[in-house]
Image (cartoon, rainbow, N blue to C red):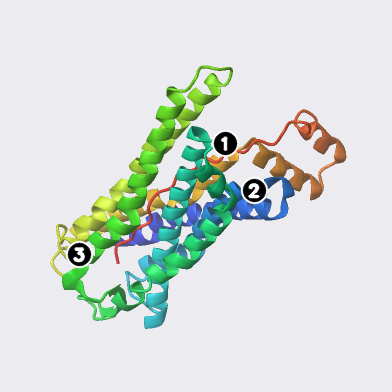
């Protein structure tokens, strides 16, 4: 495979559109949740936190990764920019995962034990829990500032942003995988499976069809979560274990194919930042109504606004928060 085709065609063709779309969709979620009084709730605070983490990832990390591909992994911004970028990447990953854990726990308790004291306490303090995630995860990831830095490219002797203690690279990636991926992913899966079981074994009332749809929806989220996140997870661990060799031992063709596989896996994980707001849009009727309201304020006629909301203005607001995510991990 030609390296120029890979760098100048595939990289911008795959990563740039997903980056732009992710920025637009997550900004839409943030704006609606910020300026719509009907969407302000404790549960939607978690959605706001998730969209903010996704936006931080695609605005700061993804563009720099595209530029790295363009310069064939040569780093041009200095050592502290390298350390800061790796730190922001890991923080956004951790915030996303543990925000999803809170979402899964909140949904399970709200459906399975709606009158329980723990459920009511969690509902009242979801905003504080989301803030705690944003305060604790930067502190928990501070070690990343010291393990990444500038190294030398084996072929060109140019500066690259890399892991400094390569002899411990596999142990470090395994630790990060367990703490920031395996534990939250396992927790999310357990909560969603318990939620699906609770919905399927619940009392058959008039809401049974809705419960069945929710169970199928949760099953779809879990499947998409695993399918989108696992390829890069496996590739990252294999790379850190040296199963693919290193840049100085691979020939150009093998190196290009390895880069292509990593690029595809990174594109799959990049879809996380698109799937989240899309799912929230399609699964939450009130959110779509608020988007139409905001659009109407920007210049649509009053008649169009009345037509768009005539059937739903008197409908009570019911919130549906069901999101999935993929783990963002990169090989550096």
SS type, badge 2? loop
Q: Relative to 214, is 156 above or below?
A: below
What is the quadrant of residue 220 in the picture?
top left
Q: Can you name the residue that lies furthest to the right here?
A: 302
- Find residue 118 and report its horizontal and vertical position in percent: 50, 45
On the picture, is 244 further left or further right than 264?
left
Q: Which residue is mark 2?
A: 41
Q: Nearer the viewer, residue 58 or 70?
A: 58
Q: Please give the name of the residue rendered at 77% of the width and 34% of the height, measured from the top-left corner.
A: 308
Q: Residues within 10 Å of mark 3 (few under 14, many from 20)?
A: some
On the picture, is 252 further left or further right than 226?
left
Measure the C-alpha gap from mark 2 to mark 1. Answer: 16 Å
Measure the C-alpha gap from mark 3 to mark 1. Answer: 40 Å
Q: Which residue is mark 3?
A: 171
Label ID, residue 283: 1
Q: Relative to 248, is 254 above or below?
A: above
**Contact check, label 3 and label 1, Cβ < 8 Å:** no
SS type, badge 1? helix
**Contact check, label 2 and label 1, Cβ < 8 Å:** no
- Find residue 19 and report its horizontal and vertical position in percent: 49, 56
């Amino acid at each position: 495979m030609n390296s120029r085709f890979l760098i100048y065609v595939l990289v911008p063709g795959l990563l740039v559109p997903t980056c732009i779309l992710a920025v637009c969709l997550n900004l839409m979620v943030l704006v609606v949740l910020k300026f719509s009084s009907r969407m302000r709730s404790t549960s939607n605070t978690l959605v706001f936190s998730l969209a903010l983490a996704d936006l931080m990832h695609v605005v700061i990390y993804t563009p720099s990764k595209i530029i790295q591909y363009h310069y064939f992994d040569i780093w041009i911004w200095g050592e502290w920019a390298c350390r800061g970028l790796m730190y922001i990447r890991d923080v956004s990953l951790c915030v996303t995962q543990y925000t999803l854990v809170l979402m899964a726990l909140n949904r399970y308790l709200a459906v399975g034990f709606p009158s329980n004291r723990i459920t009511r306490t969690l509902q009242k303090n979801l905003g504080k829990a989301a803030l705690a995630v944003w305060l604790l995860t930067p502190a928990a990831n501070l070690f990343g500032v010291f393990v990444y830095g500038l190294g030398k490219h084996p072929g060109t002797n140019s500066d690259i942003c890399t892991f400094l203690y390569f002899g411990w690279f596999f142990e470090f990636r395994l630790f990060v995988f367990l703490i920031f991926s395996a534990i939250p992913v396992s927790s999310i899966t357990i909560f969603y499976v318990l939620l699906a079981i609770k919905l399927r074994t619940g009392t058959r009332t008039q809401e049974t069809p809705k419960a069945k749809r929710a169970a199928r929806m949760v099953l779809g989220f879990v499947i998409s979560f695993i399918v989108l996140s696992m390829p890069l997870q496996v590739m990252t661990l294999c790379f850190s274990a040296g199963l693919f060799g290193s840049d100085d031992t691979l020939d150009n063709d093998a190196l290009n194919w390895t880069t292509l596989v990593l690029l595809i896996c990174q594109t799959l994980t990049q879809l996380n930042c698109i799937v989240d707001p899309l799912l929230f849009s399609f699964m939450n009727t009130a959110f779509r109504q608020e988007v139409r309201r905001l659009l109407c304020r920007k210049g649509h006629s009053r008649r169009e606004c009345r037509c768009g909301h005539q059937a739903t203005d008197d409908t009570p607001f019911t919130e549906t928060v069901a999101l999935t995510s993929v783990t963002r991990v990169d090989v550096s």
